[in-house]
Amino acid sequence: MTVVTVGVHIVDILTRPVEFIPQGQDTVLVDQIRLTAAGAAAGTAVDLAKLGHEVVSLGAIGDDELGDFLLMVMARHGVDVSKLVRKPGEQTAASILPIRPDGGRPSFHVPGANLGVTLADLDVDALRAAGAVHLGGVDVTFGLGDPAFFALLDELRAQGTIITMDLLSEMPDLLGMARAFLPHVDYFLPNDSQALLMTGADDVATAASQLLAEGPKGVLVTLGAEGSLVVTPEGTTRVPALKVEVSDTTGCGDAYCAGFVTGLLSGRDVVGAARLGTAAAARVATGLGSDAGIESLDDVIRTESENS
Ligand SMILES: Nc1ncnc2c1ncn2[C@@H]1O[C@H](COP(=O)(O)OP(=O)(O)OP(=O)(O)O)[C@@H](O)[C@H]1O
Ligand SMILES: [Mg+2]
């Protein structure tokens, strides 16, 4: 069965290591510059394909060179991009990320075509055929916050499709709108700042239980190098991050989602799936870019078992 990723598609332009922005017109030599397919749908789609799934990615890009690049590189990783919509006159979303020596990642971002995605851009047959649907960045593709899309998600859940959801921004207004999705998804995977901004809670555990009360079966809050907090009606489990040599943490959240979905589809329980997500994220942290580090599902399972 296929996995369908829905939402944000971004071209990331990354360089490392960056300790400072040069003065005037000065040039600083760096070790690496890379261009990758990224964003909460595209980056997760690439990881899912590497983990062995048939993946269809849905959303919108521009009819520009960045869009050509995104299609080429996602297809090269084995993602079906034939149903991605190209919007004439729009720019493909892009980020420039100067990565600090410790892996920290400030960014410059153009949201571009992601802002205009609506239900009309999605291939409903692909969604109906999926074993799992991952919504990546519904705070940015806010046009999907549509009762007709919510009804479709409910229909999919009723037929047994697993629905997961991640976010992209740290903008309180956008995050507030994303709350409307919670009654229509199975698992919600925000990072800590998103969970706090969405709820106004003072701590992550309180935020997670408030989000859980809005309808999902589980809320998994990622905490960067601190791991993640897995909250279900059965209880709360802290899953530690794996100790790896960190190069760049861009896309760790996307990899966590891809590993989590893979774990659920292979029959793991929620905490077991979170451990697979944690191992996938640890692999991605070892290289520059959200497509770095993961070779295959076996490789991620090996990383998981070596660290447990
Ligand atoms: N420094 C690190 N070392 C090991 N694992 C890490 C590190 N940073 C992140 N991770 C793993 O990646 C997971 C997700 O990271 P994080 O909370 O930073 O996601 P995020 O902010 O959503 O990232 P993004 O949206 O850019 O992909 C964490 O739960 C953890 O398991
Ligand atoms: Mg994230």
Image (cartoon, helix red, strand yellow):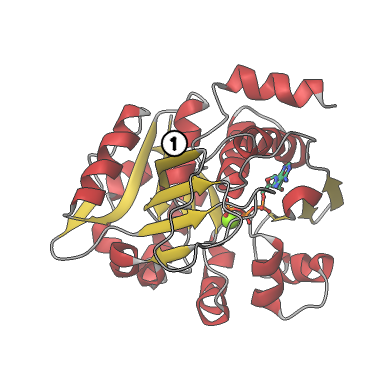
Task: Give the total of numbered labels.
Answer: 1
Question: Does ligand 1 reach within 8 Å of label 1's beta carbon?
Answer: no
Residue 202 or residue 28, whichever sits in front: 28
Q: Residue furthest left?
A: 88
Q: Residue at x 66, y 76 (%)?
A: 197
Q: Is residue 245 left or right of residue 23?
A: right
Report which quarter residue 282 is drawn in: top right
Quadrant housing residue 260? top right
Image location (x, y in percent) of residue 148: 35, 67
Please tell me in which quadrant of the rendered image residue 211 appears. Answer: bottom right
Question: Who is closer to the viewer here, 296 or 155?
Answer: 296
Task: Pinpoint residue 100: horizontal percent, then vertical percent.
Answer: 62, 52
Q: Position of residue 110 (x, y in %)?
A: 36, 66
At label 1, the amino acid type is Val
In this view, the residue in front, 2 or 158, is 2
Residue at image coords 42%, 71%: 145
**Left or right of residue 237, residue 4 in this image:** left
Q: Specify few, some or many for label 1: CA neighbours under 10 Å numbering under 14, 14-19, or 20 or more.
A: many
Q: Quadrant of the C terminus?
A: top right
Query: In x, y percent, where is residue 95?
Result: 41, 58
Residue beneath label 1, please?
46
- The relative height of residue 301 versus residue 271 in the rendered view (above or below) is above
Is residue 118 something that shows in the picture?
Answer: no
Horizontal arrangement in the rendering, residue 196 relative to residue 35 (left or right):
right
Q: Residue at x 34, y 36 (%)?
A: 74
Answer above or below: position of 109 versus 244.
Answer: below
Label 1's element? helix
Q: In the figure, 161 relative to 223: above or below?
A: above
Say whether residue 69 is visible.
yes
Quadrant containing the N terminus is: top left
